Image: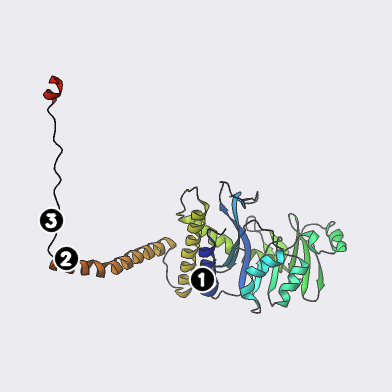
Amino acid sequence: MYKIRTILDTVVNNFRTNYVSDREISLDEGMLGWRGRLRFRVYNPGKITKYGILVRVVCEDSTGYTCNLQMCDGKCRPLTETVGFLLELYEGKGCHLYQHNYYNSVHQTNELLQKLIRVCGTIRVSRGLPKDMIEEAKKFKKSEVTFRRNQEILLISHQDKSFVSMISTLHAADVIETRSRRTSVAMKKPKCVIDYNTHMHGVDTADQYLAYYPFIRKTVKWPKKVFFCLLQCWLFNSYATFSKNNPNSRKSFLDFMSDIRENLIHTSDAVSSPSSSSDESQGSSRTPTPTPRKRAPKMTPLAGLMEN
């Protein structure tokens, strides 16, 4: 990772310091596809891109702005250290964090609560759920709910198509009637489940925009691919900032990238034009040095060669 460390730190630092996100953020992971030989290449069967470099990303919910990211370099770090690095910027600000079950546990949630970061997300059964709650949930029918609360930490289990366990420091154990998007059938779900489904798409929004107009080319050097991925993230973050500051604008992501390209071309022309004009003025006062002409090589007649 040392080959790309300098530019990676510079880009991530600009992402963190040049933008103030909304209260709702989401933590998820993505894959930068790479099938070549690489020491820290990972395999994730749950992703469309199964082989590549694992990237953990913190995104704003409303725009998909990439607030912070970390590329896994194969070193085994504790989960608390990884989450602490990604959320260092939000300590003491009272943000609402939505994340899936890999990053959630009762101990982790309690540590984030002490830093004024409130959490909502799914949780694995082995990450702190009481045994009596697990046994009770095994006998559930569809739409039945049970919960446990320890001060501000809520653990709630819900039987939908499958068994779902949630942990939250944002919600009470409220159950809301909602309708299925496909069949429009009325059903009851905990409010934390509905909010989790609503706010857990910041990373997906960024991935969707980056997939529209990719300019990453096939290469045998993995640092080049990482560089172009960071460049794409930088372009999308600029577009997200522009859209948020200009809510009435209907400029598409493609038009925005075209404008940036033209501005970069005009800027480079403006920078190079003073030097070229000065060279022309100096050249007009000087006497041009004649260029010596090259003579063509002397050709030997073919008849002479045949006589010899």
Name the residue at 37% across, 65% down. Answer: 259
What distance separates the C-alpha of mark 3 from that of mark 1? 53 Å
Mark number displayed over residue 283: 2
Residue lying furthest front in this view?
Answer: 308
Question: In the rendered image, which quarter contains the N terminus?
Answer: bottom right
Q: Residue at x 78, y 68 (%)?
A: 106
First in residue order: circle 3 vs circle 1 = 1
- State which mark lies toward you, 2 or 1: 2
Horizontally, residue 143 falls left or right of residue 25, namely: right
Quarter of the image with the C terminus in it: top left
* Residue 170 visible in the picture: no
Q: Decide which of 13, 68 is in the foreground and name it.
A: 13
Instruction: Give how far apart the Cα atoms at labels 2 and 1 are.
Output: 44 Å
Q: Nearer the viewer, mark 3 or mark 2?
A: 3
Q: Is residue 160 visible?
A: yes
Count neighbours of disc 1 (C-alpha within 10 A) and say few if under 14, some if 14 to 19, many if 20 or more. few
Give me the disc on residue 14: 1
Question: Which three-letter amino acid code belongs to the residue tagged 1?
Answer: Asn
Q: Amino acid at mark 3?
A: Pro
User: Label 3's element?
Assistant: loop
Q: Secondary structure at mark 1?
A: helix
Circle 3 or circle 1, nearest the eye: 3
- Relative to 51, is 18 above or below? below
Could you say where residue 235 lies in the image, as x and y percent from the top left? 46, 64
- What is the CA distance from the residue labelled 3 to the residue labelled 2? 14 Å
* Residue 130 location, quadrant: bottom right
Q: Amino acid at mark 2?
A: Gly
Q: Is residue 236 above or below residue 53?
A: below
The residue that mark 3 highlights is 290
Which residue lies at the image location 12% right of the left edge and 28% below the top edge?
301
Dot 2 falls on a residue whose secondary structure is: helix
